[in-house]
Amino acid sequence: MAKVFDHITDELQRFIATQHLFFVATAPLSANGHVNLSPKGLDSFRVLSPNRVAYLDLTGSGNETSAHLLENGRITFMFCAFQGAPLILRLYGQGRVVLPTSEEWQGLFSRFTPIPGIRQIIVAEVDRVQTSCGNGVPLLEFAEQRRVMVDWAAKKGEAGLRDYHRQKNCVSVDGLPTPLAEMLD
């Protein structure tokens, strides 16, 4: 049975802190646009307050979340208990992108451990917190975080990442611009 909260409780914050994986979902306004659902790992998620969260968004093959947030701000996060008691947690809200050139960057970035390949921080104001049973989620044993992306980004270096962002991360698959486009001009 689903339970709805108006904020992230201390118990739910502890649950979030123990998860190795979370999912981020966004969508464009266009009915023909592509819904995006991305898995995220590493130590990249923070609860900033009972109604505010952020995560380090690392360089990827696309930048759909950023484009959708620029267009409409809608975002949903999902955490699943793959170990221990079953639980699914969804955080619904309005998100935005904070770029390294923003005045807000350093205050947010200081809450994280740096990871090679960071392109932006996604911040969301959470207006609905919902749990559900999670009884259908399988039990899985965590082995370790993958290093492939982190190693790739470290090898590329700052200049290589800027070029990659310029080529792959300035426009969504539906042609929507991302905030990186302005920063890289």
Image (spheres, helix red, strand yellow):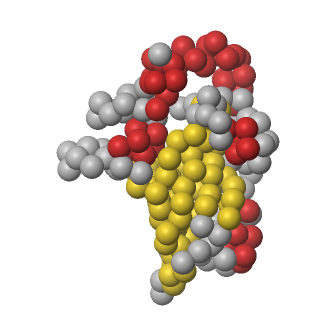
Query: How many circles with numbers are drawn on the protein?
Result: 0
Residue extending furthest front? 103
Residue at 59 percent across and 74 percent down: it is 7
Instruction: Please state which of residues 137 and 8 is positioned toward the viewer in this rendering.
Output: 8
Question: Is residue 104 placed above or below 6 in the rendered structure?
Answer: above
Residue at 45 percent across and 43 percent down: it is 65
Q: At which x and y percent is residue 72?
A: 36, 49
Residue at 69 percent across and 55 percent down: it is 46
Residue 180 visible (yes or no): yes
Q: At which x and y percent is residue 177?
A: 37, 31
Q: In this view, does 155 lie to the left or right of 177?
A: right
Q: Is residue 179 left or right of residue 145?
A: left
Q: Is residue 46 left or right of residue 59?
A: right
Instruction: Please state which of residues 180 and 79 is positioned toward the viewer in this rendering.
Output: 180
Residue at 67 percent across and 77 percent down: it is 9
Question: Is residue 17 placed above or below 34 in the rendered structure?
Answer: below
Question: Is residue 42 placed above or below 8 in the rendered structure?
Answer: above
Q: At which x and y percent is residue 20?
A: 69, 55
Would you identify the image quadrant in which residue 125 lies?
A: bottom right
